[in-house]
Amino acid sequence: MPTLKRPYAVFDIDGTLIRWQLYHAVADTMVKRSIINPKPYKKVLAARSNWKNRQSENSFNEYESALIKLIEKNILGLDYDVFCQVCADVVKKYENQVYTFTRDLITELKANNYLIFAISASPTELVSLVADRYGFDAYGASSFKVSDGKLIGRENLLLGEAKRQHLNQLIIQYDADTENSIAVGDTEGDIELLSRATTAIAFNPSRGLFDHAITKGWDVVVERKNVVYQLKYNYGQYILAPPRIK
């Protein structure tokens, strides 16, 4: 008798499961450990402040771009073991600071025999630890090149179409059922994952993802404080589903 295929659910990590951006916390930790000079980091903190103060629609992207450039400049030649320890410290601090909607959805889907995948643009040194903590079956993440025990540059950035390609590989590898598939993401970088799934959930979406989601009729979920608001697409319009209160 043939074995029934298991459906899959795929989740982004930063801002979707974890309530903060782990890569941003890596930068903070590297400054505390004097791996990154505090002086140039002040410009990144100023950009972060602009984002938090909502100075413009692009303030988050500007902040994130400045942050990534600073990290990637300062990790060149860094001992890989040191970088791994930084990542381990960050995950230990933030691994339980998660959104209840995605945490509970993962638990529910695992109980219903779903394959659970994580696909994130964060480095594998972060994503692997989160995947282990929450029992993901497999994950995809960005990676750096390592030579003689030192980081020498970026090897792979898992974003956009690259996320979709990696998901396709996991579907084939695990012989997953795609008909009842679910995807959850929070930014435009997750659109390719969401487009691949039967049920797409734009969770606490960025403006770009929200605008795209409403053109597709995707579910929109917002978690604020201890209430989860679910907007369900129904015959051409969105309706507010009964909220989950935690």
Image (cartoon, rainbow, N blue to C red):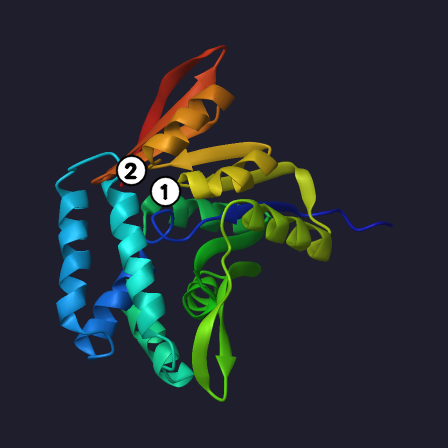
Along the viewing direction, whichever of 189 and 238 lies nearer the viewer = 189
Judge by depth and name the residue closer to the eye, 218 or 177.
218
How far across and how far down the image is residue 170, in percent? 65, 54
Q: Residues within 10 Å of mark 1 (few under 14, many from 20)?
A: many
Which residue is farthest bottom?
Answer: 148
Per the rendering, the mark at residue 223 is 2
- Secondary structure of the residue carrying tag 2 is strand
Q: Are marks 2 and 1 in contact (CB under 8 Å)?
A: yes
Counting from the top left corner in percent of width and height, residue 234 is at 47, 15
Return the residue at label 1. 101
Q: Earlier in the sequence, mark 2 or mark 1?
A: 1
Q: Quadrant of residue 37?
A: bottom left
Q: Amino acid at mark 1?
A: Phe
Give the farthest residue toward the right.
1
Residue 67 point in image, percent of width and height? 28, 59
| Amino acid type shown at disc 2 | Glu
| Residue drawn at (27%, 41%) of the image | 246
For the point 33% across and 59% down, the residue is 68
Question: From where the camera sits, is residue 136 visible?
Answer: no
- Which secondary structure, mark 1? helix
In the image, residue 244 lies at what x, y percent? 32, 34
Q: Residue at x 36, y 53 (%)?
A: 14
